[in-house]
Image (cartoon, rainbow, N blue to C red):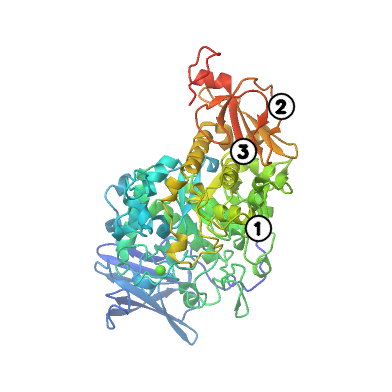
């Protein structure tokens, strides 16, 4: 039961549970339905264009809608083929008459002013009926790369054609290269890197960029229409069907490359409370308010009310729509602690009806807990993880801080040589699911493991700041690169779900800008040239990704995986052994990961509940990470300064690689 601190009008409104809010289109007629139980009149206005910018006098007709008291729904049906016709509702609430786009808009004209009727069949690109979701069996098998649509290709280093730079269609260009080189960029690059999913910063319609000019830059965490793709990423924001088709082309191109698509969804607040379609349609319902004051736990002036029946239904309908219509493979919930856990579990249940493998995770915090309007017992914080499905993940900020220190300051974490939060790192390596080292997750599938995201300094900028060394963002100082490699080993060799900001693997810099949400392209664009400058670092990530995919214990996501992983920490060196005895005939039986954050060579011990082998091969060290053996391990049990070491048992390796003579060193580079 949700604790309600502030006004909740569900008690006085009848609600609606069918799936036909918005419009239902056929070639012969279109039916419109809008839930507006507080309204005394609702009119449907049809327009020939999507914006007053295009034409001042384009009203086609004004139509009375009819009210059903039982459901609170106003409806009307218009004969004819309305594909491409724009519409608004004029809603009379008390003395106030508001013209608004549809809460359930599927298409809009430029800058969202009017909704559009669309025959979605006509927006499907060639081969869309054969397009398949990209799913993994467990969330922990996903390797997530977070990217902003515009950043991906806005630089000329992307090699993408000029007309597609910064748009959805950039994702459809294959075999792109850094100009005058053979270095792959964009989707071709991602195929080689080996990540499984991209997470797109907001791609629903947001309010902070003028779609008519596309000049401003913004991350887009300011929703206007949740079920409409953003227009500034399309080649034509004026015609509502174009962005839908181009969005689908993007998804299909990624799917064809074997890469899944996760949407960043921001149901917690909107661009504007008062000017939103929600508030204009049903005032004082969809947002948490105290009197006339919008509560502000989302930090942006208004927080939505997930606990209200019809906003909860909206969230559920919305994720289902993106999954089914756009073939989206997962959702990342912004400021998830603004939402109540009942809503999130209901979303999980609803997605499970489509496919249990659809990814779900979010930020387990708000921007202001004191102004959230629901009880701390009800919100989706880490402390309440046990109330949530084990397939709803949460970003592990404890481990993040333990790895590298504070997000924006000059403090150090383990990788820069500090030791005070090392136990948080150990707990995180075990997917925040270990009773020994610390636990908030039910199992590792709930733990998103990361060192960088769009918020805050990039990992590279943080390393420069915390080492007090220089402000040369193009440095190739091996000390900084080694710390970056250590971070990669933590993120990719842990039991949770690995996640990284796009370009973490090639020393992405925003030149010290810790909050680049509206900074220019010169700060935010991916500089693909850095994949060449920092090729050694990219290859290291690539190798660790390959290792992760070959060792199933890392992605098992169960209590069993935690029990079979034995972690030790001697004050300097972290060492973990993983006994994958049930891993099947095509896997290594034992793997160990060792991390040294000191300036000196250190010795370590390997411990396990199981009898450990005495012959090992090195598959990752200070220099190289590889799916293959680099050399035999010398059994000195020493690790070089500032480095990670990953070793696998030689017997398994020999067996898998059909090496008969145990004295022959296998196939080393
Ligand atoms: Ca927009």
Distance CA(mark 2)–CA(mark 1): 39 Å
Instruction: Read off the residue under disc 3.
Output: 643
In the rendered image, residue 3, in percent from the top left (x then y), is placed at 67, 64
Say which label, 2 or 1, has the lower sequence index: 1
Res. 485 image quadrant: top right
Q: Nearer the viewer, residue 261 or 359?
A: 261
- Residue at the (41%, 58%) spot, across then down: 149
Quadrant in which the N terminus is drawn: bottom right
Q: Nearer the viewer, residue 514 or 536?
A: 536
Distance CA(mark 1)–CA(mark 3): 21 Å
The answer, for residue 137, to whether it is visible in the render is no
Say which label, 1 or 3, has the lower sequence index: 1
Q: Dot 1: what SS?
A: loop
Furthest-top residue in this view: 661
Ligand 1 - quadrant of the structure image: bottom left
Instruction: Read off the residue under disc 2.
Output: 609
Q: Nearer the viewer, mark 3 or mark 2?
A: 3
Q: Nearer the viewer, residue 277 or 425?
A: 425
Res. 97 image quadrant: bottom left
In the rendered image, residue 319, in percent from the top left (x then y), is placed at 47, 56
Residue 368, disc: none
Considering only vertical position in the picture, is 141 above or below 321?
above
Q: Dot 2: what SS?
A: loop
In the rendered image, residue 511, in percent from the top left (x then y), is placed at 52, 60
Instruction: Read off the residue under disc 1.
Output: 410
The answer, for residue 165, to whether it is visible in the render is yes
Q: Residues within 10 Å of mark 2 (few under 14, many from 20)?
A: few
């Amino acid at each position: 039961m949700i604790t309600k601190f502030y006004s909740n009008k569900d008690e006085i409104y009848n609600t609606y549970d069918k799936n036909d809010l918005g419009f239902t289109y056929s070639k012969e007629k279109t039916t419109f339905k809008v839930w507006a139980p507080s309204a005394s009149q609702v009119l449907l206005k049809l327009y020939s264009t999507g914006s007053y910018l295009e034409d001042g006098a384009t009203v086609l007709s004004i139509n009375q809608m009819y009210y059903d008291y039982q459901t609170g729904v106003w409806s009307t049906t218009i004969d004819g083929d309305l594909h491409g016709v724009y519409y608004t509702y004029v809603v009379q609430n008390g003395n106030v008459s508001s013209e608004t786009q549809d809460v359930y808009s599927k298409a809009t004209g430029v800058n969202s002013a009017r909704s559009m009727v669309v025959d979605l069949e006509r927006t499907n690109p060639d081969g869309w009926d054969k397009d398949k979701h990209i799913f993994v069996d467990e969330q922990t098998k996903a390797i997530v790369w977070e990217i902003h649509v515009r950043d991906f290709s806005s630089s000329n280093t992307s090699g993408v054609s000029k007309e597609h730079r910064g748009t959805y269609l950039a994702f459809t260009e294959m075999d792109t290269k850094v100009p005058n080189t053979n270095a792959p960029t964009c989707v071709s690059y991602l195929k080689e890197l080996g990540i499984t999913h991209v997470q797109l910063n907001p791609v629903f319609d947001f309010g902070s960029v003028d779609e008519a000019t596309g000049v401003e830059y913004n991350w887009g965490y300011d929703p206007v229409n949740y079920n409409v793709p953003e227009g500034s990423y399309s080649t034509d924001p004026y015609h509502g069907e174009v962005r839908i088709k181009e969005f689908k082309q993007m998804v299909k191109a990624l799917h064809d490359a074997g890469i899944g698509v996760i949407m960043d969804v921001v149901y917690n607040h909107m661009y504007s409370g008062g000017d939103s379609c929600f508030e204009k349609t049903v005032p004082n319902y969809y947002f948490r308010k105290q009197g006339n004051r919008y509560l502000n736990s989302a930090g942006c002036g208004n927080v939505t009310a997930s606990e209200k029946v019809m906003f909860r239904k909206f969230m559920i309908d919305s994720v289902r729509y993106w999954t089914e219509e756009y073939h989206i493979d997962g959702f990342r919930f912004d400021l998830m602690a603004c939402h109540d856990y009942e809503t999130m579990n209901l979303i999980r249940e609803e997605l499970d009806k489509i496919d249990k493998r659809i990814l779900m995770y979010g930020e387990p915090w708000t921007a202001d807990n004191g102004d959230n309007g629901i009880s701390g017992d009800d919100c989706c914080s880490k402390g309440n993880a046990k109330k949530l499905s084990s397939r709803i993940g949460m970003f592990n900020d404890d481990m993040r801080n333990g790895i590298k220190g504070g997000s924006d300051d000059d403090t150090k974490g383990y990788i820069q040589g500090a030791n005070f939060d090392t136990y948080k790192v150990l707990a995180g390596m075990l997917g925040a699911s270990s009773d020994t080292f610390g636990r908030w997750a039910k199992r590792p599938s709930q733990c998103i493991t990361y060192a960088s995201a769009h918020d805050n300094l990039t990992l590279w900028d943080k390393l420069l700041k915390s080492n007090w060394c220089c402000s040369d963002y193009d440095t190739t100082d091996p000390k900084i690169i080694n710390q970056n490699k250590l971070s990669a080993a933590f993120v990719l060799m842990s039991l949770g779900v690995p996640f990284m900001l796009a370009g973490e693997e090639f020393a992405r810099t925003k030149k010290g800008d810790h909050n680049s949400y509206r900074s220019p392209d010169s700060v935010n664009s991916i500089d693909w040239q850095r994949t060449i400058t920092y090729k050694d670092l990219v290859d290291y990530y690539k190798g660790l990704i390959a290792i992760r995919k070959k060792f199933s214990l890392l992605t098992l996501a169960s209590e069993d995986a935690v029990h079979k992983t034995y972690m030790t920490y001697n004050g300097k060196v972290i060492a973990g052994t993983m006994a994958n005895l049930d891993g099947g005939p095509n896997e290594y039986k034992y793997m160990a990961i060792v991390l040294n954050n000191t300036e000196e060579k250190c010795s370590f011990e390997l411990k396990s509940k199981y009898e450990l082998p005495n012959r090992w091969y090195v598959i990752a060290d200070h220099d190289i990470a590889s799916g293959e053996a680099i050399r035999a391990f010398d059994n000195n049990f020493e690790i070089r300064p500032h480095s990670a070491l990953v070793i696998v048992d030689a017997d398994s390796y020999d067996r898998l690689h059909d090496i008969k003579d145990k004295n022959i060193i296998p196939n080393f580079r």
